């Protein structure tokens, strides 16, 4: 079986997940829920999906498998992952989201939630073990078409109500906001929320075929499209998400995407958080902002959530987590001028987008002015796609093998001052610039992250980093 758990959920080619593999892992998950006392017999599992062509078939297989184990599936239809998680949390249910998030259209995935939130890395290991034990069990691998009571309207209403509590009424009435709809499962809900806040909303780029959108590495073609739309429609902002609506994309009035870690940072300040948890790939300038403790983790929502839980266990109250892709997690509940926002420890795209837009309006700023007020180092990232997992592992082994090997690899770029190995290899150069090499945990991709004080320097460093990877690939 080629499917495996990545930074968030099970991932693989759609052709691998359609059929018995999805039945097997859904069965293993259901067994895990019952055997670990997360759900009693007859407990509920909420199921939703994104707009990928393979997602409805996988969801139907999953619901049949859940019922065979003695649990009750409910069908939440096509809704964002955070909406599914919120609904499951509200009714005390587990949940399964069928989605490949931002990865290419020929791939898909499954995200699993206990009634108290996302599964963790230990849970992943248990589910993987159970799947291996059931691999030759005919019933566990049986492919049937299951259904469940439709709860899409209820789950949608709950999530919309939550988001209408984040800002004051009519907070966005002065703005013209473009919603880049593409094939995001959040597109209609996002349009509805912004309109209810009084914004003039312009729908952009709706697609009935799946388009992968990586909010952490927006392509040059998509950036050009955002700039074109912004000028053409005289927009104050463009907002969007990835395929399952748990990662935000926010572009300023010129169509320039804001960094995801900036969105999370603005959200944390908007909520008056006291503890911020974020991976090592997020901007190194976050610590300089002040006003909260910063905890760094490996990349992936399970690691961020584990660290948030650790902070809560020691008594912290205002705990927020976010990733460099902008997905923002609430470890604790917050009160915003008498408006209660419940904890939601899973990635959410709506909260950071609303917090950024609301903060800009409250200060009388454009989004570019809001971004500039933080004075963070310029951080950029990109990826080399179709970079085999084995090649990524070989490159990382080479870079970690010796300091001389790392120095030689980076010699055309700069001298190494220091390096850290929390997740991938993050190098600080003698002149203070930062370059970070990391294989993707979800797809056959090699990622490069950079930081510099000036945009031109960051762009050049990113080009050099990607060229170094390609050069190594061509000579080995």
Image: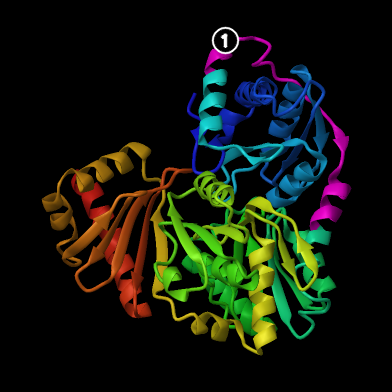
Classify the position of the C terminus by image quarter: top left
Whether residue 248 sits left or right of residue 125 in the image: it is right
- Depth check: give the residue in front, 221 or 452: 452
Residue at which label 1 appears: 136
Q: Which residues are magenta?
A: 132-159
Determine if the magenta segment contains residue 180: no
From what the image shows, is residue 369 above or below residue 397? below
Q: Residue at x 41, y 63 (%)?
A: 381
Percent x, y of residue 32: 64, 23
Percent x, y of residue 156: 83, 52
- Depth check: give the residue in front, 111 or 167: 167
Secondary element under disc 1, as helix, strand or loop, is: loop
Q: Residue at x 32, y 36 (%)?
A: 390
> Which of the 4 quarters of the picture holds residue 38?
top right
Q: Residue furthest bottom?
A: 364
Q: Does any portion of residue 234 appear in the rendered image?
A: no
Percent x, y of residue 235: 67, 82
From what the image shows, is residue 279 above or below residue 34? below
Whether residue 90 sits left or right of residue 325 in the image: it is right
């Amino acid at each position: 079986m080629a499917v495996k758990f990545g930074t968030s959920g099970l991932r693989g080619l759609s052709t691998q997940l359609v059929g018995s593999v999805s039945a097997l892992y859904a069965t293993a998950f259901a067994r895990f829920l019952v055997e670990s006392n997360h759900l009693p017999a007859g407990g509920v599992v909420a199921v939703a999906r994104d707009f990928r062509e393979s997602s409805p078939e996988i969801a139907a297989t999953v619901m049949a498998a859940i019922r065979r184990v003695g649990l009750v599936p409910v069908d939440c239809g096509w809704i964002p992952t955070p909406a599914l998680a919120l609904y499951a949390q509200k009714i005390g249910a587990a949940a399964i989201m069928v989605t490949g998030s931002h990865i290419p259209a020929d791939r898909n995935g499954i995200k699993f939630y206990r009634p108290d939130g996302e599964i963790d890395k230990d849970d992943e290991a248990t589910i993987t073990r159970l799947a291996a034990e059931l691999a030759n069990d005919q019933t566990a691998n049986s492919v049937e078409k299951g259904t469940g009571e439709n709860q899409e309207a209820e789950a949608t209403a709950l999530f919309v109500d939550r988001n209408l509590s984040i800002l004051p009424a009519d907070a966005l009435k002065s703005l013209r906001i473009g919603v880049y709809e593409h094939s995001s499962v959040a597109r209609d809900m996002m349009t509805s929320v912004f309109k209810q806040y009084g914004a003039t909303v312009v729908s952009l780029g709706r697609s009935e075929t799946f388009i992968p959108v990586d909010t952490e590495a927006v392509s040059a073609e998509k950036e050009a499209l955002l700039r074109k739309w912004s000028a053409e429609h005289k927009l104050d902002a463009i907002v969007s998400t990835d395929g399952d609506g748990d990662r935000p994309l926010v572009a300023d009035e010129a169509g320039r995407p804001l960094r995801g870690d900036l969105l999370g940072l603005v959200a944390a300040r908007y909520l008056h958080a006291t503890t911020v948890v974020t991976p090592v790939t997020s901007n190194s300038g976050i610590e300089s902002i002040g006003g909260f403790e910063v905890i760094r983790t490996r990349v992936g929502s399970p690691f961020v959530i584990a660290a948030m839980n650790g902070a809560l266990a020691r008594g912290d109250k205002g705990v927020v987590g976010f990733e460099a892709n902008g997905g923002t997690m609430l470890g604790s509940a917050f009160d915003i001028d008498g408006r209660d926002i419940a904890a939601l420890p899973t990635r959410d795209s709506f909260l950071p987008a609303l917090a950024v837009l609301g903060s800009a309006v409250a200060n009388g700023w454009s989004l570019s002015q809001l971004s500039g007020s933080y004075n963070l180092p310029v951080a950029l990232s990109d990826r080399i796609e179709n970079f085999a997992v084995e090649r990524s592992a070989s490159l990382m082994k080479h870079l970690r093998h010796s300091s001389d090997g790392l120095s030689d690899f980076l010699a055309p770029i700069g001298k190494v001052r220091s390096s850290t190995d929390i997740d991938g290899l993050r190098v600080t150069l003698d002149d203070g610039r930062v370059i970070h090499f990391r294989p993707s945990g979800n797809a056959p991709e090699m990622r490069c992250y950079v930081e510099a004080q000036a945009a031109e320097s960051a762009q050049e460093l990113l080009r050099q980093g990607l060229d170094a990877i390609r050069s190594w690939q061509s000579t080995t």
